[in-house]
Image: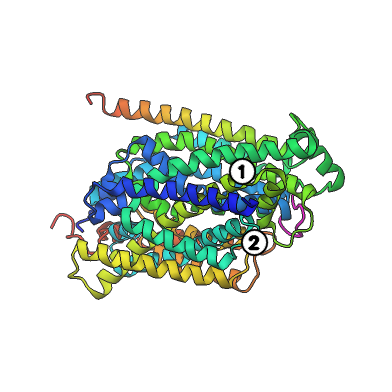
Amino acid sequence: MPATRTTMTVKRPSVAALLLALVPFVAMCFSVPLWDRIDPILFGLPFNLLWLIVWIVLTSLCLWVANRVEAARSRRAAPHR
Amino acid sequence: MSPALVSLATILAIVAFGTTIGFLAGVHRKMDLEQWTVGSRGFGAVLVFLLMAGEVYTTFAFLGASGWAYSRGGPTLYVLAYLTLAYVVSFFVLPQLWELGRRHALQTQSDFFHARYGNPYLAGFVCVVGIVSIIPYLQLQITGVGIIVSLATFDRIGRVAAMAVAVVLLVAFVFASGVRAVAWVSIVKDVLMLGAAFAIGIGIPLVHFGGVGPMFAALVHVKPGHLTMPGATANLGHAWFISTVLLTSLGFYMWPHAFASTFTARSADTLRRNAVVMPLYSLTLALMLIAGFSAVLIVPGLANGDLALLTVVRQTFPPWFLGVVGGAGALTAMVPASIFILSAATLFAKNLYRPLFAPAMTDDQVAVLARAMVILLGLISLVLAIFSSTTLVSLLLTGYAGVTQFFPGVVLGLYWQRVTMRAVFAGMIAGVATAAFLMLSHRDPVFGLSAGFLALCLNFLIVVAVSLSVPVAATDRQLPDGTADLPAGG
């Protein structure tokens, strides 16, 4: 398979998209000691479960914005297409 | 009709319906290797979503997650976090991978390593680790079908017989129709599973406690520590949570089948949009966890947590509904299992057997050998499922410890020009060896951290250190196919 350096290279994501991706990692993973508790119980759910459910939805939102950012960037890079 | 007969008939009807759809999906297409393994790279957003949802939400989500919620408690929340964060990672890996796949006609994970690093032994090693890691995941699905059928028929059909029937169906199914069938059966499977998840997650607490809120209030009262970490375990605390979420979310698309499903997409943009939508699907898992938590109070004292969900369903709903849940569960096991078998068989034939033993094989002959491997792999996992007694979650985490070791080679390979073949190979061997040693000698978790995660850190360190130790000038002359470039300006 004739692979050369140029054909194995891909475009790096933008800093903005990476920062948007970091948000859910902080919220759902690294900050676990802060939200892993039962109180306050909201909507009948323990706080840790509710927190994760809310962040599932917010993660989708973060990626939606990241996708817009990346799409806008590739449009700027190739305005004639 | 007896309750067992009603539920069994319902399960069989659902499985038969799903299988028929799978067969029909492949009927009018010529099955060459490219069509069989990557659907000729023609899947739009909807089919890619269905394929990925189909292979992601396995019987682990159905029985394993609820089983851990029942037996372990709080630590099970890792499932919600990792499934969501895996899509965040995928946003930055899959579209890029797809681009390379199109340029170099890649079909498998091993193809990628060969194209990027140009070493057949590295590609072969990736292939072996991938197949070995996927076997526990396959075993998990077959064990799941056994549990479902024997519980749903009130133990009329034994687990071994149920597992044997599942393997036969599975092999026939993969044989006939390849990757396209899996995407189509996913439609049936997903609709049923979504329906079942809502009925179970909301219905069970409603029937027994008058709602989800009262159920949690009662659980907090009876077992105050169950819902937070470490729950009912001694050592699965916050450090374990963070390390396991990182291990599994980074490793998620490193499974050979998930990696290869990237290549079915029609465009890189399909994969980006898919990453935006997929996290919402993990909400289903929250419902499964709620059902598992309810079971703590309704059916206490089960020896095997994996039985909790269906035992509660059997006590709460009429037999026909038990059949619906059982049928959904059986498809939920069989759809992913068929794609695991398909990927592992293709890897073996295309990336291990042909390059090492029979370089002259044509693509068509590879496809025939892959089909033969499907039977062998089915039998291996059946035997393992019969003789093993590990919980479903442990099986999954064992496989993850293996496949996540591909992550440094994939991500650094995509984004870092300096990474070398030797560095990736050394890091991967160290990572796999460390993970295997720690898990097989039952030292997981180590100091409260996931063993697979420690192995991954070691792997990363070695890859970076070895790559940096090679002078830039030397790496400049090193092409990814392993040959030296002509001296510059010569």
Taking depth in this image into account, of B47 and B252 the one nearest to the observer is B47
Other-residue count near label 1 (Cα within 10 Å), few / some / many at <14 / 14–19 / ≥20: many
Q: Residue B186 location in percent, x, y?
A: 44, 44
Mark nearer the N terminus (2 vs 1)? 2
Instruction: Tell me where the magenta segment starts and ends, as one range.
Output: B229-237
Which residue position holds label 2?
Answer: B155
x 33%, y 36%: residue: B44
Say left or right for B144 vs A6: right
Numbered mark located on residue B321 in the image: 1
Q: Quadrant of residue B284?
A: top right
Taking depth in this image into account, of B143 and B249 the one nearest to the observer is B143
Work out which residue is located at the far left of the displayed protein and give it: B490
- Looking at the picture, which amino acid does disc 2 mark? Asp
* Chain at numbered mark 2: B
Say left or right for B366 vs B439: left
* Chain at numbered mark 1: B
- Looking at the picture, which amino acid does disc 1 mark? Phe
As helix, strand or loop, the secondary structure at mark 1 comes to: helix
Q: Does the magenta stretch mainly form a helix, a strand or a loop?
A: loop
Is residue B103 something that shows in the picture? Answer: yes
x 47%, y 29%: residue: A64
Q: Mark 2 to mark 1: distance in Å? A: 17 Å
In the rendered structure, does residue B52 fall within the stretch colored magenta?
no
